[in-house]
Image (spheres, rainbow, N blue to C red):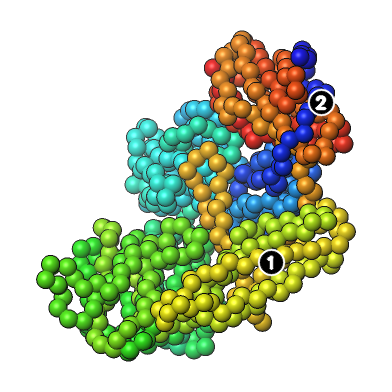
């Protein structure tokens, strides 16, 4: 047994002879959080990225233009970046990743906003310490320590209105915060939690002039360094939803915008929309809604379109509506096919439509509401012809859907039915809303049409790797929607010179009967390469046919240690040449308690690739002040060790996540154990 006493704080060195182990799983870089979480156009700034397995990261890749940067320095758990945001960078979320010899990382979200951005300053945990701010602005802050509270102070004039919008989960932070507005006497004026799933939000107009305080604090869970947020205090409106949700190309409608602070749009200068063929004019703004005229020119592409209000005080958020090419339902219970229907959902008041279907005809009933901002949860039912109830009192429900099975997508409450009718006849379509709605802004848009067969290509990963001399692969799920049944060919575009991927044929599905066909097929694309250097990478796309649909993946962006998360649709992937792992470490405890003046022991195991041998040196990153490694003990087989930590009597107290044990071999290759949490009492 070998023991070594160390007195050097957070660094530990040890030479061990370990026995060979089993095969090792490849480890990609993992990004957890970025701080600050955003900036305004035309700025340069330094940001910090926290994560794991970030050693030797050399390239920074943004998914869209507008932001560039470089990695200044890094460790296994932290990267310091220099970013440059161009003056014409698009507003909203931008997604980025890093590439190292391990491969390409997951993506993080960095948000570009139109307001002046400032950084939170500490200490600001008491009213007398409150940070003075001058809204409108965007504040980048963190609630990253035990009992951390951020308090802000600002002046408001009588009748002055603001919109308070705190983004944490929507930026991929695990923070679950609350937001409280106080007057100068400490009386509560507003309080919000979980307005946007996890994020607080409210509007406020000052009744009298004076000092106001905004109090930000976590609702539950331990504080973590990854728990950042952005607080927008705006004089521009916030939009929730538009009614109607769908507009036919070649027409114009008088629509209603629902939101907060819409009376702030009286100084409106312009609208921004998705296309030059889409225009908008303000007719009448009020506090929580506004009448607008939307025009969509003939020939405008069908699909999602956005709308933004721009005032002299700034921009609203972006809301979505749908441009379609179907005849608009003229009203009444009788429905022609195809048709587009719109309305406002009512809780407990189902709607009934009657339509005709042909024999062996496939019809699509596609309802859009929740994913476009409407606060409803709709269901669709198709009722067979005949009596509305059978002898046992049950309706003759032919098919029903509540939440459509949108592959790898969360929080989609919109129903969709694709059904082939066996016989011609008269059928009923029932629409119901499952959620109680407390306001009139609850629109839906329903399309009843004949099937439009198409493919969706879902990538199993957006981080494929190729190992030198061994190649690599990428699995693709080919989803056949609305009755698609033809053969297809998948090709990869964007491969770097020296790498190859042969086209893959997706055969015609084995249709066992007229009604049965597989909803999806899995295919594998194989990559081969010549002697490309490790860390060579390229953005690639998987395409069906000549200019057909492109492969995509819905990714979850979350810092961990909390409930907050954001979701993004990433088209394509970043393919990288990656070295194989030589060894790996794992602490046998996920959480360690340490008393001031006391000790705690962490068992650590190690596994090697068969060809790997030699000594291992260790380092521990992110130990709090006053905590050091005192001893290391290894077993006789050299397959495990025990690290003993000692806390000084004046050691920093609290819960410290992201404690990283790192081993480096004699060739300079290093590996990090999964992070652990240290609690110092």
- Helix, strand or loop under label 2: loop
Q: Position of residue 225 (x, y in %)?
A: 59, 35
* Residue in the picture at 87% in, 36% down: 667
Q: Can residue 541 be seen?
A: yes
Residue 640 location, quadrant: top right
Q: Quadrant of the N terminus?
A: top right
Left or right: 100 with respect to 504?
A: right
Look at the picture and state if 644 lies above or below 105: above
Using a 10 Å C-alpha cutoff, classify the residue at mark 1 as few (fewer than 14 neighbours), some (14 to 19) or many (20 or more): some
Left or right: 79 with respect to 531?
A: left
Q: Position of residue 626 (x, y in %)?
A: 67, 17
Most foreground residue, 587 or 211: 587
Q: Are discs 2 and 1 less than 8 Å apart at CB? A: no
Q: Which residue is mark 1?
A: 525
* Residue in the picture at 85% in, 66% down: 498
Left or right: 57 with respect to 419?
A: right
Q: Which residue is mark 2?
A: 17
Most foreground residue, 433 or 211: 433
Q: How many marks?
A: 2
């Amino acid at each position: 047994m070998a023991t070594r006493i160390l007195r050097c704080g957070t660094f530990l060195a040890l030479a061990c002879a370990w026995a060979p182990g089993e095969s090792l799983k490849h480890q990609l870089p993992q990004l957890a959080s970025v701080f600050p979480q955003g900036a305004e156009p035309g700025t340069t700034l330094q940001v910090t990225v926290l994560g794991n397995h970030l050693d030797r990261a050399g390239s920074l890749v943004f998914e869209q233009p507008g932001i560039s940067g470089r990695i200044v320095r890094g460790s296994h758990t932290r990267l310091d970046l220099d970013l440059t945001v161009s003056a014409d960078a698009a507003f909203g979320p931008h997604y980025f990743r890093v590439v190292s010899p391990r491969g390409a990382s997951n993506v993080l979200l960095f948000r570009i906003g139109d307001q002046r951005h400032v950084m939170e300053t500490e200490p600001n945990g008491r009213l007398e310490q409150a940070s003075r701010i001058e809204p409108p602005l965007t504040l980048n802050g963190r609630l990253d320590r035990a009992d951390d509270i951020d308090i802000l102070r600002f002046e408001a004039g009588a009748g002055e209105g603001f919109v308070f919008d705190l983004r944490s989960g929507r930026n991929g932070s695990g923070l679950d915060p609350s937001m409280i507005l106080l007057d100068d006497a400490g009386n509560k004026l507003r309080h919000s939690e979980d307005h946007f799933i996890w994020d607080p939000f409210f509007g406020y107009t000052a009744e009298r002039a004076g000092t106001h305080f905004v109090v930000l604090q976590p609702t539950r869970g331990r504080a973590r360094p990854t728990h950042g947020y952005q607080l927008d205090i705006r004089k521009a409106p916030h939009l929730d939803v538009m009614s109607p949700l769908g507009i036919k190309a070649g027409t114009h409608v008088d629509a209603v915008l629902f939101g907060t602070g819409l009376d702030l749009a009286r100084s409106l200068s312009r609208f921004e929309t998705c296309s030059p063929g889409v225009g908008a004019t303000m007719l009448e703004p009020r506090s929580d809604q506004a009448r607008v005229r939307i025009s969509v020119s003939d020939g405008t592409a069908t699909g999602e379109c956005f709308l933004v209000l721009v005032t002299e005080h700034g921009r609203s958020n972006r809301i979505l509506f749908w441009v379609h090419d179907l005849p608009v339902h003229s009203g009444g219970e009788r429905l022609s096919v195809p048709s587009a229907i719109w309305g406002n959902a009512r809780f407990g008041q189902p709607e009934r439509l009657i339509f005709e279907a042909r024999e062996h005809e496939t019809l699509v009933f596609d309802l859009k509401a929740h994913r476009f901002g409407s606060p409803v949860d709709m269901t669709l039912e198709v009722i067979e012809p005949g009596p509305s109830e059978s002898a046992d009192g049950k309706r003759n429900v032919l098919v029903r859907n509540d939440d459509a099975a949108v592959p790898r997508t969360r929080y989609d409450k919109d129903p969709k039915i694709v059904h082939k009718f066996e016989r011609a006849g008269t059928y009923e379509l029932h629409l119901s809303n499952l959620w109680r709605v407390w306001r009139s802004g609850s629109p839906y848009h329903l399309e009843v049409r004949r099937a439009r067969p198409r493919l969706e290509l879902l990538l199993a990963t957006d981080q494929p790797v190729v190992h030198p001399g061994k190649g690599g692969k990428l699995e693709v799920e080919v989803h056949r929607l609305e009755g698609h049944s033809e053969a297809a060919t998948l090709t990869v575009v964007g491969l770097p010179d020296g790498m190859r991927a042969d086209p893959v044929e997706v055969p015609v599905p084995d249709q066992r009967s007229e009604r049965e066909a597989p909803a999806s097929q899995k295919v594998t694309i194989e990559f081969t390469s010549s002697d490309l250097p490790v860390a060579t990478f390229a953005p690639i796309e998987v395409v069906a046919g000549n200019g057909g649909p492109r492969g995509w993946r819905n990714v979850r962006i979350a810092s961990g240690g909390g409930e907050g998360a954001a979701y993004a649709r990433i088209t394509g992937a970043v393919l990288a040449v990656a070295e194989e792992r030589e060894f790996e470490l794992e602490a046998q405890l996920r959480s360690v308690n340490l008393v001031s003046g006391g000790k705690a022991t962490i068992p650590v195991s190690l596994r090697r690739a068969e060809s790997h041998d030699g000594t291992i040196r260790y380092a521990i990153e992110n130990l709090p002040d006053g905590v050091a490694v005192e001893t290391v003990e290894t077993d006789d087989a050299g397959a495990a060790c025990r690290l003993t930590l000692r806390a000084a009597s004046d050691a920093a107290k609290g819960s410290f996540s992201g404690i990283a044990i790192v081993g480096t071999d004699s060739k300079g290759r290093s590996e990090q154990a999964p992070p652990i949490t240290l609690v110092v009492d």
